[in-house]
Amino acid sequence: MFPNTRMRRCRSSKGLRRLARETVLERGDLILPVFAVSGEHREEPIPSMPGVSRFSVDLLRRRAAELKAGAVLVFGVPDPAAKDERGSAAFQEDGLVPKVVGALKKERPDLVVITDVCLCSYTAHGHCGVLTPEGEADNDRSLELLARVAECHAAAGADMVAPSAMMDGQVQAVRERLDTAGFPDTPIMSYAAKFASSFYGPFRDAAACAPGSGDRRSYQIEPANRREAVREALLDEEEGADWLMVKPALPYLDVLAELRRVSRLPLAAYQVSGEYAMLKQAAASGALDERNAVLETLTAIKRAGADAIITYYAEEVHEWIEQ
Ligand code: PBG
């Protein structure tokens, strides 16, 4: 008790504060999302995400040579004409994402290339699976297609696949497929606790994947539900997930902390497009110091339990931190 105990003693110099620091954000924690489009020499800036662009495969390959991040999460954004009811362009062996994976691994064999496994950018209706006649995402019919997507990515050399469609049984379907197709060593990062969030707004511009009608509430988790998110994550673990993810990150730190307590798997958190856009715009208006605010959010995400953080700020953060 005061005056014997004085919390400020250990805060009195930079050196003392550094020794007592509990959470240290490292460069090796960061995963950069990248968006790929077809064609050549194409760079398309995304207006709602200043500083983020979609790139064609040749430009992504060139960028890979200079990339500071040690890991990327690849999203394919096909031409509108390539979309159909089943998202077939997502499971072509020589499709966009397999090409990107090949190009990145050729340029930078050490780069950890993770791929998003979903159908929403590839379906004409924009949902994450095929539809029932009533227009709902058809869980069981979508599993086979998602498994094929994952197989194409693994065959192209992806270091890890990340199913994000929130179909029940998708991790099991992907694991079985990878095992029988000869990729038993390709790990799965499950978007286990993926909430039906408004913070995906800018991403839906970036990846052209907004649902044409309806929303994703029949498959993504209700933002109010923590217990349900924990059940989802534990089921994915039983189905064979190697990593679990919480998404979005900052509004769901309680979920991250709870998963850290109940699971021994490594945990990723996704600082999503809307979180990025909020920080960018607040910084651009002068309301926040960008560097300090971003590092504070990422440190908070790590403190809550994340081992790795997927963030559009990965390249900047590499410049901002020392190790
Ligand atoms: C698609 C997908 C989404 C994001 C990642 N994968 C959007 C969605 O579910 O609507 C969001 C990423 C972001 O907002 O940065 N399955």
Image: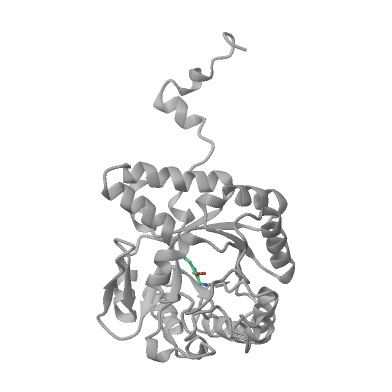
Task: Measuring from the top left, give residue 246's x and y in whole percent.
Answer: 58, 58
Q: Is residue 11 visible?
A: yes
Asked whether 175 or 35 is in front, the reply is 35
Which residue appears at 62% of the width and 83% of the height?
147
Indicate left or right for 183 with 302 as reference: right
> From the image, which quarter does the N terminus lie in?
top right
Indicate left or right for 98 with 259 as reference: left
Task: Measuring from the top left, give residue 192's x and y in whole percent.
Answer: 63, 64
Which residue appears at 57% of the width and 48% of the height?
253
Task: Measuring from the top left, give residue 252's x and y in whole percent.
Answer: 57, 51
Residue 117 vs 14, above or below: the answer is below
As drawn, which residue projects farthest toward the left?
Answer: 41
Asked whether 111 or 272 is in front, the reply is 272
| Residue 303 figure quarter | top right
Residue 18 vs 273, above or below: the answer is above
Asked whether 179 or 275 is in front, the reply is 275
Which residue appears at 47% of the width and 89% of the height?
89
Which residue appears at 38% of the width and 91% of the height?
81
Task: Measuring from the top left, give residue 41's x and y in whole percent.
Answer: 25, 81
Q: Is residue 61 visible?
A: no
| Residue 244 figure quarter | bottom right
Indicate left or right for 213 with 187 as reference: left
